[in-house]
Image (cartoon, grey):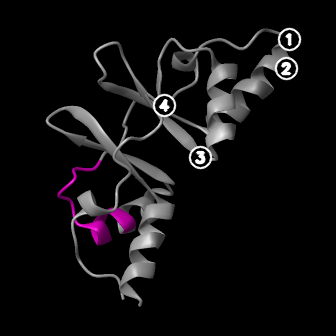
Amino acid sequence: MLQSVGLRDYMITNPIKVKEDDNLLDTMKIIIDNKVSGVCVINEKKVLVGVLSEMDCLAAILESTYNNIGVGVVSEYMTKENIVVAHPNDDIINVAQDMLLKKHRRRPVIEDGKLVGQVSCRQLLTAVNKFNK
């Protein structure tokens, strides 16, 4: 059974990050090559400004195809508002429950205003697996 522990031990400490002005097609290649469901988006000060998911990319490609326009930069398609974040000391069970409730596959982890990690469903499953042994 999953125990009540802090997120710090299970989060990815160096999540894949892209900049808000990166080309969307290049970012899609990063997502595909790294086999992740999304990335954290940072600005020039390395502050989290958004998240970009596979679904955001798919919507961008469909919009581009439908409107017969080129695909732009990450900031045009990323989620910017109401980004739910976690703190490294948050309880892993609470984070898992909230991710399920909100149907999020990943959550940026912020400490002192800076992006320090990310937790995804895979890290949560790893924690469950560890405590089931």
Between the C-alphas of marks 4 and 2, the distance is 21 Å
Cα distance, mark 3 to mark 2? 24 Å
Residue type at mark 1 is: Asn
Callout 3, which amino acid?
A: Val
Residue 60 to residue 83: above or below: above
> As drawn, which residue projects farthest toward the left?
112
Q: Residue beneath label 1, please?
A: 68
Q: Amino acid at mark 2?
A: Thr
Q: Label 1 to label 2, Cα distance in Å?
A: 5 Å
Which tag, 1 or 4, sits closer to the chain's start? 1
Q: Earlier in the sequence, mark 4 or mark 2?
A: 2
> Pointer 1 and pointer 4: residues touching (CB < 8 Å)?
no
Judge left or right: residue 110 versus residue 74: left
- Residue drawn at 49 percent across, 62 percent down: 121
Marks 2 and 1: in contact by CB < 8 Å? yes
Residue segment shown in magenta? 86-96
Is residue 85 shown in magenta? Answer: no
Instruction: Tell me the SS state at disc 1.
Output: loop
Q: Secondary structure at mark 3?
A: loop
Which residue: 55% across, 41% down?
Answer: 38
Looking at the rendering, in which quadrant would you find the N terminus?
bottom left
The residue mark sitting in front, 3 or 1, is: 3
Quarter location, residue 128 = bottom left
Q: Nearer the viewer, residue 65 or 34?
A: 34
For disc 4, the marked residue is 79
The CA span between labels 1 and 4 is 23 Å
Residue at which label 3 appears: 36
Give the amino acid type for the residue marked by disc 4 in the picture: Thr
